[in-house]
Amino acid sequence: MIRSNLELAAYIQMLYKKGAYDIREEQFNAKHKIIEQDRRYNRVYVIVEGISKCYISDENGKEFIQEFLGEGMEFGELEVFSKKHTICSIETITPLKTLSISHSGFNELLENDSLFNQLVMKALADKIRYKAPRHSYQHSYPIEDNLLRLKKIFPEFTSVICKKDIANYIGVTVRSLNRALKDLKEKNNQI
Amino acid sequence: MIRSNLELAAYIQMLYKKGAYDIREEQFNAKHKIIEQDRRYNRVYVIVEGISKCYISDENGKEFIQEFLGEGMEFGELEVFSKKHTICSIETITPLKTLSISHSGFNELLENDSLFNQLVMKALADKIRYKAPRHSYQHSYPIEDNLLRLKKIFPEFTSVICKKDIANYIGVTVRSLNRALKDLKEKNNQI
DNA sequence: TACTAAAAAGGACATTTGTCCCATTCATAA
DNA sequence: TTATGAATGGGACAAATGTCCTTTTTAGTA
């Protein structure tokens, strides 16, 4: 549920310590919007500490959360490959510490550092691998099943992530989420 | 709706003509399952001609179609980066012509051909960019809106793709799809 | 402490979608 | 040509989810 990539986190920190390229450290408070949908930015970020959410909002303001990003997850990288606007917003949930690098530095690294290249390639592949089953599962199973599944992979999710975000992650309304939680409680399946 | 990547198609054909690596041409009939979920394979495919579907099936046999793949789309590449089982099945819709390359050849290309590396990287990024808004849109809009949207980006979709596949792509039952189509017809919004 | 806004919980009802059927059409193979 | 199974279309009802609203709880702040 909260994605991470410890290998990438370790590697980017190693690069940072070596003082290579123009890697920069940044800190953000909770509830800070780092990236806004449909804009252009010129840095790629890797999370070193904390949790943020990556979401799409539609014209009615509805949010659909794509993933929760934890240590080692990168964002802003898609726009390096296809020079278009961002498709997601990124907002911190907890205070966040990141390392970031400019598009040109990122490209240099991809070109010259074969291990970095492989790590980024694998990170992209993992995002795809992860998304596919999640959406199909959510679509074809009732809310209760989705909650039990979340509980299994991340037992304390209800205390870290607010109801609205959980609902937007599963793709239902808060009302429906509450209903499902209540029903589970009555069945003695505490969440 | 039917994804394509003409740049990659052209590039892989150029490599094939040069006789480089171990690129091999293959043909498949319609309704042939090329890749089965939860298996291991050791080749990466690029579609040169035809249409196939990429789908996940659950334990009840329900299919959820991830994308329809057209010219230039690759499949089987995710398993090069993370050495795990396939997450999707690939089945042809029309007769299909592909070029394929072994995992080791693919890795060699990534390592030695910087342009190929970039094309693959971009292809992965595009798969992510494409998936995100699609799923969130499907989730938050009624079936009719989804159909009108499909109609806009691919007007003749109903004649190329069977009802079951369209339903599995949108993530609804065939019954619901038929209901929506009928309602649209009554509103004079022919599809 | 008292006030305020946001988050959480849930009642009542409407709407959408699914499930379970059955009838019809279409394509294909015997 | 006939037989067979798949694809299509839709009726009737059940179940899941959304919408709209109100109340309660919580957390933060004057």
Image (cartoon, coloured by chain):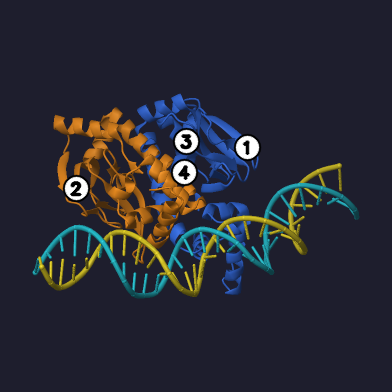
Chain colours: A blue, B orange, C cyan, D yellow
Tags 1 and 4 touching, CB below 8 Å:
no
Q: Secondary structure at mark 4?
A: helix
Q: In front here: D1 or A190?
A: D1
A96 relative to B119 in the view: left or right: right
- Answer with left or right where residue B21 lies relative to residue A2: left
Residue type at mark 4 is: Pro
Could you confirm whether marks 4 and 2 are on the same chain? yes
Which of the labelled discs sits on residue A12, or is there none? 3
Residue that mark 1 sits on: A28
Residue at the location (28% across, 42% down)? B70
Chain of the residue under label 2: B
Q: Tell me the amino acid under the disc marked 1.
A: Phe
The chain to which mark 1 is attached is A
Name which quarter of the figure residue A24 lies in.
top right
Chain ID for label 4?
B
Residue receiving disc 4: B133
> In the figure, is residue A149 to the left or right of D30?
left
Where is residue A141 drawn, in percent x and y?
Answer: 46, 63
